[in-house]
């Protein structure tokens, strides 16, 4: 078992990817911004079956699903990803920037898991 974190900044606030690599599975928690929380949870089994729970009013499933599938594809292990990243007053361009940051974080996490 090992753990590591990858952090990034946007809007003077931290976004964290906290990774727990178990003997037979990986858990990732994505959180930060103005309000850390749990907005969505995705799990991918060894059989590549994806299941997602999205809490009312949240849109983090796009992150949880893409991260869970990418990590599962690379490792073949069961993966669970939770996400809760909230910034007050963001617009479409801001969200695009945050998504770019998250993609860079995912690439780094995939390298570190290997």
Image: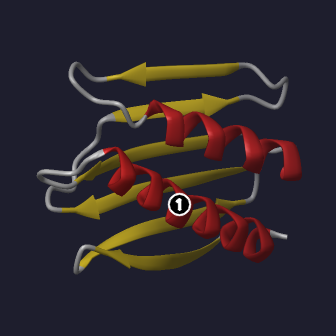
Residue sitting at 14 percent across and 61 percent down?
Answer: 34
* Quadrant of the snapshot with the C terminus: bottom right
Q: Which residue is mark 1?
A: 102
Rendered location of residue 96, percent (x, y): 46, 52
Q: Residue furthest front?
A: 93
Task: Count every numbered label the image shows and give the total.
Answer: 1
Of residues 89 and 113, which is closer to you in this image? 89
Q: Is residue 97 left or right of residue 70?
A: left
Q: Is residue 46 left or right of residue 104?
A: right
Rendered location of residue 106, percent (x, y): 64, 62
Using a 10 Å C-alpha cutoff, classify the residue at mark 1 as few (fewer than 14 neighbours), some (14 to 19) or many (20 or more): many
Q: Which image quarter: residue 11?
A: bottom left
Residue sitting at 34 percent across and 56 percent down?
Answer: 94
* Quadrant of the snapshot with the N terminus: bottom right
Here the colouring is: secondary structure
Would you say residue 79 is visible in this rendering? no
- Give SS at disc 1: helix
Rendered location of residue 101, percent (x, y): 51, 66
Residue sitting at 22 percent across and 19 percent down?
Answer: 56
Would you say residue 54 is visible in this rendering? yes
Q: Is residue 29 left or right of residue 77?
A: left
Q: Is residue 89 left or right of residue 23?
A: left
Q: Which image quarter: residue 65?
A: top right
Rendered location of residue 16, percent (x, y): 40, 69
Of residues 96 and 18, which is closer to you in this image? 96
Residue sitting at 58 percent across and 19 percent down?
Answer: 51
């Amino acid at each position: 078992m090992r753990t590591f974190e990858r952090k990034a900044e946007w809007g003077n606030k931290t976004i964290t990817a906290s990774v727990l690599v178990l003997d037979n599975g990986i858990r990732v928690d994505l959180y930060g911004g103005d309000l850390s929380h749990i907005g969505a949870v995705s799990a991918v089994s060894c059989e590549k079956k994806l299941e997602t729970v999205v809490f009312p009013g949240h849109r983090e499933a796009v992150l949880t699903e893409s991260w869970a599938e990418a990590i599962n594809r690379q490792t073949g292990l069961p993966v669970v990803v939770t996400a809760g990243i909230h910034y007050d007053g963001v617009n479409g361009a801001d969200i695009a920037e945050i998504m770019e940051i998250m993609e860079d974080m995912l690439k780094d996490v995939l390298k570190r898991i290997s």
